[in-house]
Image (tube, rainbow, N blue to C red):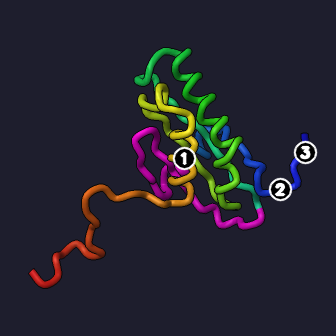
Amino acid sequence: MTSNNQKSTVGRLKSRPQFLAVREGEQRKGPLFLLEVLDRGEAESPPRCGFTVTKKHGNAVERNRMRRRLKEAVRLSAGFAMKPGHDYVIVARRDLLNAPFERVVGGLCQRIENKQKIHGHSRPASGKNDGK
């Protein structure tokens, strides 16, 4: 099966130095995972993605299931939202294991496009309260 959309191909991060480099970038937190994003400054190169599931989140079977769910979410829809020249590392949280797949895909697309919801109130632009 071939695709006419060149943007849908997502490379993989494989080595430890690649993963560590992405930690220096932006972090986008969510209830199911943490998304780390780094702009490599190479607009022509395809985006790359890596997956991390730590041992504190269950046994090997559960960790592999979480990793497979994340990979499938990226393959189906989130890969289209990823920007060329960027690296993404998705760090799974325990709730990912039992969350509905549609929620995983939606949350991933939302974090990639950086449309975070702020619950309750918005933070002021500066650290000070102006006028009080």
Q: Residue at x 49, y 35 (%)?
A: 92
Vertical side of 108 occupied by 99: above or below? above
Q: Quadrant of residue 14?
A: top right
Relative to 6, 21 lies left or right: left
Alpha carbon distance from label 3 to label 1 = 25 Å
Assess whether mark 2 and mark 3 are in contact (beta carbons under 8 angstroms): no
- Three-letter code, disc 1: Gly
- Three-letter code, disc 3: Thr
Q: 10 Å neighbourhood of mark 2: few (<14), some, or many (≥20)?
A: few
Image coords of residue 83 (percent x, y): 66, 60
Disc 1 marks which residue? 106
Disc 3 marks which residue? 2
Alpha carbon distance from label 2 to label 1 = 21 Å
Pick the quarter of the image with the N terminus.
Answer: top right
Q: Quadrant of residue 95?
A: top left
Q: Is residue 30 magenta?
A: yes
Alpha carbon distance from label 3 to label 2 = 9 Å
Q: Which residues are magenta?
A: 21-44
- Three-letter code, disc 2: Asn
Image coords of residue 122 (percent x, y): 28, 66
Q: Residue at x 27, y 67 (%)?
A: 123
Q: Residue at x 58, y 22 (%)?
A: 64
Q: Nearer the viewer, mark 2 or mark 1?
A: 1
- Tell which of 70 and 55 is nearer to you: 70
- Tell which of 105 and 91 is nearer to you: 105
Assess whether mark 1 and mark 3 are in contact (beta carbons under 8 angstroms): no
Q: Nearer the viewer, mark 3 or mark 1?
A: 1
Disc 2 marks which residue? 5
Q: Is residue 63 magenta?
A: no
